[in-house]
Image: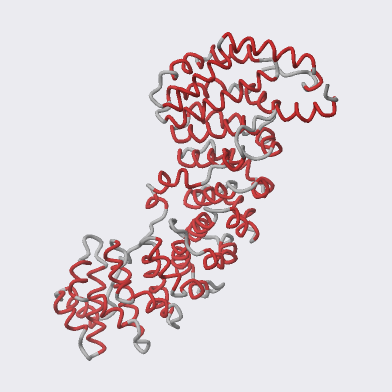
Amino acid sequence: MQSQENVMPNRLKTFKNRGKDVEEMRRRRCEVNVELRKARKDEQLQKRRNIALVDEPQSPLQENNNRTQLNMSIETIIADMDSNDPQTQLNATQAARKMLSRERDPPIDVMIKAGLVPKCISFLSHFNHPSLQFEAAWALTNVASGSSEQTAVVIKAGGIPALVALLASPCANVSEQAVWALGNIAGDGAGPRDLVLGANAMPALLELIRPDTPVSSLRNIVWTLSNFCRNKNPCPPFEIIRTSIPVLNRLLHVNDAMILGDACWALSYLTDGSNEKIEAVIREGVVPQLTELLGTSDVTVLTPALRTIGNIVTGSDVQTEVVLQAGALPQLKRILQHARGNLVKEAAWTLSNIAAGNVSQVQQLINEGLLPPLIQVLETGDARAQKEAAWAITNFTSGGTAEQIVILVQHNVLKPFCSLLDSSKDWKTVIVVLEGIKNILETAEKLGELEKVAVMIEECGGLDKIEELQAHENQEVYKKASSIIDSYFSEDGAQDQIENEEEIAFSGANVPNGGFSF
């Protein structure tokens, strides 16, 4: 017979339902990446066209010039761009820019076919004529704001190195316009982005972020910086983009919503990956300020700040603890009750990864009062938020102690949890719920409380739903449902319960004082 010293550790292990490895329980962004990216243009435009909302002439001469430009044909514009007269070149390029700045249906393809792009790129090197550089860069910005095919024309004509060279221009409007054009190119996808980064654009861009940089310029720079960090498959070279982390940390303290939002988006892309990438961001000390930003009412800042915090807690328990110590849980509790469903979903997803942590982290969820609002999401949230809340509950049951799982059940989780078995249209969510129910039943069995919990599940309609799932078209669903019925609701299951009660009675010292009451 084993000594009590050997029995206790083994028994204690059975009070934790770690059916899955912690890494398996962590749910990285890639799992929900497609869904989240469908609305990415609502979250942050990858490309921006520079539209001149006000282009007022400042003198009679300029007014006449304006009228002349508006009446110029594309053929005349291209011909005048070939002129040897600098003023004629400028007027023609400005006319082209104005056509491409039209709010509706700019003639990008017509301009491309007429040969505009190589002419504009050649003008970028006219450092003795900054006005011409500016107009050419603006025209190229708007060409690159179009389709991938249109952006590719700028790339193939050698636009990237020419625009990167302009980042060092002494004329602020020229360098800013180059920033904008490069942001559009990098925003076109991973390939164009890497071409921009490969042209040494990152250090040149970071040089432009100074204490005296005007807010209007800083907004464009930070937006472009976020596009440098954006896109996956492949991710941008981390050795290049990690150089932006100290700058992004400083930008988190700027009092401007657009700058804060884009800085947070950049950090969300940086943390959307391996633990090593997450660690590089954490070491820079961004977590406390990110956590502070979770309290903002401005959703343009809150959304990417929450996304970044969510990505960080997909990392190790140690990395998750940094977020918890920064005070994120009270903020997440508030966001769970936000009017915007997408934010509720993101908060629940974040909590699902915290629930996949160690016992201490699960306990912090309890102590901070996260269970009631999380269960409320199970009851009244939209389908996407309910799915994330279900993951949080199941991860809680997988990693929590028996005592913690008892507390969860005492919060009346079973009814809304079981309701998802037939209300959810997503079979993956059904499997997640079944896994959580199995964990709860397994814990109850170990505590000699199986009959009580089985009755609770039956009374809230859960048993009927599980029985119906035995006929589900998905093989994994019906197998899991059948396994639960066979193990916990059949006569054989009842016999196992009797034997288990006898075992617990024999080693009753393993049940905490006062016992457990569901």
Where residue 289 sits, quadrant-wise, is bottom right
* Quadrant of the frame with the N terminus: top right
Residue at (65% x, 59% y) in the render: 283
- Image coords of residue 72 (percent x, y): 15, 76
Depth order, front residue of 87/161:
161
- From the viewer's perspective, is 205 left or right of 452? left
The quarter holding residue 140 reads: bottom left
Residue 416 versus residue 265 in the image, above or below: above
Quarter location, residue 181: bottom left
Left or right: where 507 falls relative to 325: right
Taking depth in this image into account, of 207 and 210 the one nearest to the observer is 207
In the image, residue 499 sits, relative to residue 428, either above or below, namely above
Q: How many marks?
A: 0
Q: Quick check: 329 above or below 156?
A: above
Q: Colour scheme in the image?
A: secondary structure
The picture places residue 22, in percent across and down from the top left corner, at: 62, 40
Q: Which residue reaches farthest bottom?
A: 84
Residue 468 percent location from the top left of the image: 43, 16
Residue drawn at point x = 85 percent, y = 25 percent: 3
The C terminus lies in which quarter of the figure? Answer: top right
Q: Residue furthest front?
A: 1
Q: Residue at x 42, y 80 (%)?
A: 165
Q: Residue 44 at what x, y percent from top left?
A: 41, 55
In the figure, is residue 394 to the left or right of 195?
right
Residue positioned 40% across, 70% down in the render: 195
